[in-house]
Amino acid sequence: MPSPVPSSLPHRVPDLGAMVLLLAVARHGSLGRAARDVGISQPAASGRIRSMERQLGVALLDRSPRGSRLTDAGALVTDWARRVVEAAEAFDAGAQALRDRRDSRLRVAASMTIAEYLLPGWLIALGAERPGTAVSLLAGNSAAVALRLLAGEADLGFVEGLSIPEGLDGTVIAHDRLVVVVAPSHPWARRSRLSPRELAQEPLILREHGSGTRQVLDAALASHGGLARPLLELSSTTAVKGAAESGAGPCVLSELALGEELSARRLVKVPVEGVRLRRQLRAVWPAGHRPTGPARDLLSLTARKPDGA
């Protein structure tokens, strides 16, 4: 039957630093040279050995002008200390191997807008800082990102929406604005503004439930009668833009995703008065587990980028 695991070390077990010093004394036969070897002063080394002797209740060294010699008890304690130090070195090597394995890969889950329009720049910068890290990206809506993180399938996530998903911690990394856009041929293209009620009543080309875009739009129009039944419900920003460009109907998307279409006038922005369509973009991770290694480095890179607003 295995022995029970103690809740703490016995009070007579010296600390690891004292054992390393004792091994240095045994190796050099001199307290002064041992002190230089471990990087402390000779008085500090002498005090540490005396403290160790008091703790163990035995003399470890015979001190003389010619040097320091291990007593019989000191030789026995040194043998024990060597095994402890070797075990500690093996423990440290194993921990380093775990860190190296962790740092060799990064699994990122991101909502569509962030994955397509912000993450590429961050990942290029991360590659310059950590060229040996292999990065995999899982793109989906904000709800899917939360599920990936909670299932342990991603190290760091990025979401859009009104709040941090349950079970996650996070920080705001940017702000974004949703805009209403239509094809130049659509009647709204000639409007100087829309009311929230008009937007709510119009069948729109929308992202699916669970997307950050849909969450913000649902909340913004809840007091104006809520969204009408969608004209189309699509699972990617690219598909929504394509449908709007074809003249199928209006859509509401992140301003980050519309730069090229607006500048080329393939889509036209239609202002909406009296409704707030801003949202926060967040980095998220499982609650209580702050990002480490390459995930921490990627998180720091997001802080160096300007707002998407």
Image (cartoon, rainbow, N blue to C red):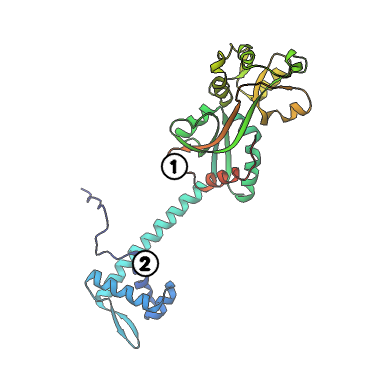
Relative to residue 213, is residue 4 drawn left or right?
left
Mark 1 neighbour class, 10 Å CA radius: few under 14, some 14 to 19, many 20 or more: few
From the viewer's perspective, is residue 94 above or below residue 56? above
Amino acid at dot 1: His
Residue at x 61%, y 18% (from the top left corner): 206
Q: How many marks?
A: 2
* Quarter of the rendering occupied by the C terminus: top right
Amino acid at dot 2: Gly
Q: Which residue is mark 1?
A: 289
Considering depth in this image, is 38 or 216 the residue closer to the camera?
A: 216
Residue farthest right in this picture: 264
Disc 1 or 2, which lies upstream in sequence? 2
Image quadrant of residue 278? Answer: top right
Considering depth in this image, is 297 or 279 the residue closer to the camera?
A: 279
Residue farthest bottom in this picture: 65
Residue at x 39%, y 79% (from the top left corner): 42
Q: Which residue is mark 2?
A: 17
Report, in whole angstroms, how far the alpha carbon at label 1 lies from the one at label 2. Answer: 30 Å
User: Where does the image place residue 2, in percent across and percent down from the top left?
Assistant: 23, 49
User: Where does the image place residue 56, in percent across and percent down from the top left?
Assistant: 24, 69
Relative to residue 277, is residue 62 drawn left or right?
left
User: Where does the image place residue 295, in percent across and percent down from the top left?
Assistant: 53, 44
Secondary structure under tag 1 reads: loop
Residue at x 48%, y 50% (from the top left corner): 99
Image quadrant of residue 279? Answer: top right
Secondary structure under tag 2 reads: helix
Relative to residue 43, is residue 278 drawn left or right?
right
